[in-house]
Structures are given as C-alpha cells and as structure tokens.
Image: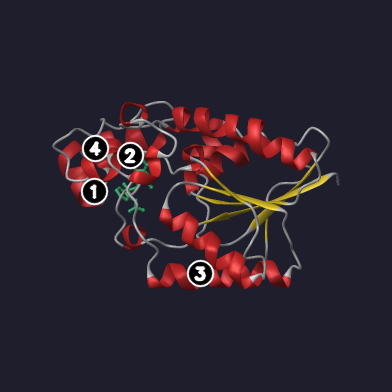
Amino acid sequence: RQYRVVMVRHGESEWNLQNLFCGWYDAKLSDIGREEAYASAKMLQEAGLEFDVCHTSLLSRANDTLDVILREIGQPNLPVYKSWRLNERHYGALTGFNKLQTAQKYGAEQVQIWRRSYDIPPPPIEEDHKYYSAIVNNPKFALELSKDQIPRTESLKTTLQRVIPYWEDVIAPQIRQGKRVLIVTHGTSLRGLVKHVQEMSDEVIVKLNLPNAIPFYYDLDENLQAIDPLRFLAD
Ligand SMILES: CC(=O)Oc1ccccc1S(=O)(=O)Nc1cc2c(c(O)c1O)C(=O)c1ccccc1C2=O
C-alpha cells in the first residue's frame, strides 16, 4: 500500500436519539454519543494507529468526538483543521423534523422521492423556521462563511460538490506528503469521501449508512484511490 487514511463518523447526537434531521443545527453529543466516542478511541488505540494531522467540521458533535479521541489516544496536541466543507448535509426546512412530522407535512410519497434522490434538495429553511436563527447566526460558521454564503438547503449532489474540493485541495496533499490523516465528521460528508476514493455509484452511495463512531480506514494507491473497500476497525 502507499497511504492510509482513517475516518470516523461522530458519536450519536441528542437529535440522532430522537431521529430528527439535524444537518447544520449544532446538536450536542448524547451521553451515549460520548461513550461511543470513547470506545472509538479505544479501537484506534488497539489498532496502534497514530496520526500527524486531523480534519473535522464546524459542528460540535464531530469536534467533541474528535476531542475525546485525541485525548484518549494520547495525541491531545495534534494539529486540527476545521472546515464548513466537512459539515453534515443541510436538510433545509426539514431541520428538527422527525419521521412523522416530515410525512405529515410533505406526504410519504415526497419523503420517498427525497430519500432516494441524488440532486433534489429539501425546501430551503426560511426566516420563520424555528432553527433558522440558530443556524444562520452560529458564530462558528462566521469563521468561514458570511450569512448569505450559508446554504439554506442541500441536495446530496451539492453536498458532495463542496466536500470533494476539500479532499482534493487540503487533505490529499497532506496524504501525499506522507502525513497520517484522521478525519472525524458526519454521515453525508463521509459518504462524499467514500464515493470519491472508492468509486461508488450514486445508487449505492445513497444507501450507505455509516455507523456512529466505528473507525474505518482505506489503504490508498499512488492516485489516492482505494486499494480495497472500506474496512471497519473491529472492536
Ligand atoms: C430512520 C428514520 O427514522 O429516518 C427518518 C428520520 C426523520 C424523518 C424521516 C425518516 S425516514 O424513516 O423516512 N427515513 C429517511 C427519510 C429521509 C432520508 C433518509 O436517509 C431516511 O432514512 C433522507 O436522506 C432525506 C434527504 C433529504 C430530504 C428528505 C429525506 C428523508 O425524508
């Protein structure tokens, strides 16, 4: 193998617990989520994995998962890169909705269409939405984005279109320099990275659901393409 990259989806958030669309809302890790983060650190330690640099989003559930991991693997001072580009997909007006509310408001058929679609975004979040202000006024996003640059909704396609350039422009050069990279982020942004290095079809990637806080890794060839399909660290 030429290179290895390790990826982890954040631990369960308080909104995952209630099966709410979370997206860009900054939900915290649940108690279970913190336990999961701790367990993922132990899996990384068991596997003897060490890192030179790590990447995460601007959302607390990923940042806090990473903090637990770095502390537990004994690398608390690892350089950390944070970017909006690794944020979870933005679910627009569906933010904060559960399954029932979504079906009640938009109908089961529309849900099925959205669920399977690659480039149909949910309706945008509007100013009168309960969570509009919490998202648009989040000071963490202001580090990189002006208010009108903050998306109001995202399709899977537009999400991948902002994730992949981050891989190409920031992460890939570090891997080519021989840096051991850890990425702790979200389900949909990870799907973007998986699709990019493993050449997955749109149909398959739409169905891929990554478990919370189970690290997985790729061995990459000289073109940073996966030599084998993703492998989870058995716990
Ligand atoms: C497992 C679960 O309860 O998922 C939820 C959670 C909240 C609302 C709806 C559901 S659901 O049961 O209809 N399943 C469900 C529903 C959806 C999605 C999805 O991946 C999914 O699994 C999407 O990706 C998705 C993406 C963009 C707009 C709507 C949906 C959507 O409506």
Q: Nearer the viewer, mark 1 or mark 3?
A: 3
Q: Give the mark nearer the N terminus: 2 vs 1.
A: 2
Label for residue 59?
A: none
Find out if the beta carbon at label 2 lies less than 8 Å from the nearest ligand 1 atom: yes
Secondary structure type for disc 2: loop
Label for residue 91?
A: 2
Provide the residue designation for mark 4. Answer: 93
Furthest toward the right, the residue is 1
Secondary structure type for disc 1: loop
Point out the quarter of the image occupied by ligand 1.
top left
Q: Give the mark nearer the N terminus: 3 vs 2.
A: 3
Provide the residue designation for mark 1. Answer: 97
Provide the residue designation for mark 3. Answer: 36
Q: Give the mark nearer the N terminus: 1 vs 3.
A: 3
Residue 226 visible in the displayed image: no
Query: Residue 31 placed where, x, y %?
Result: 39, 72
* Distance from Cα at disc 3 to Cα at disc 2: 24 Å
* Distance from Cα at disc 4 to Cα at disc 1: 8 Å
* Distance from Cα at disc 1 to Cα at disc 3: 24 Å
The answer to whether mark 2 and mark 1 are in CB contact below 8 A is: yes
Q: In percent of the image, x 50 and y 60: which residue is there?
A: 212
Furthest toward the left, the residue is 128
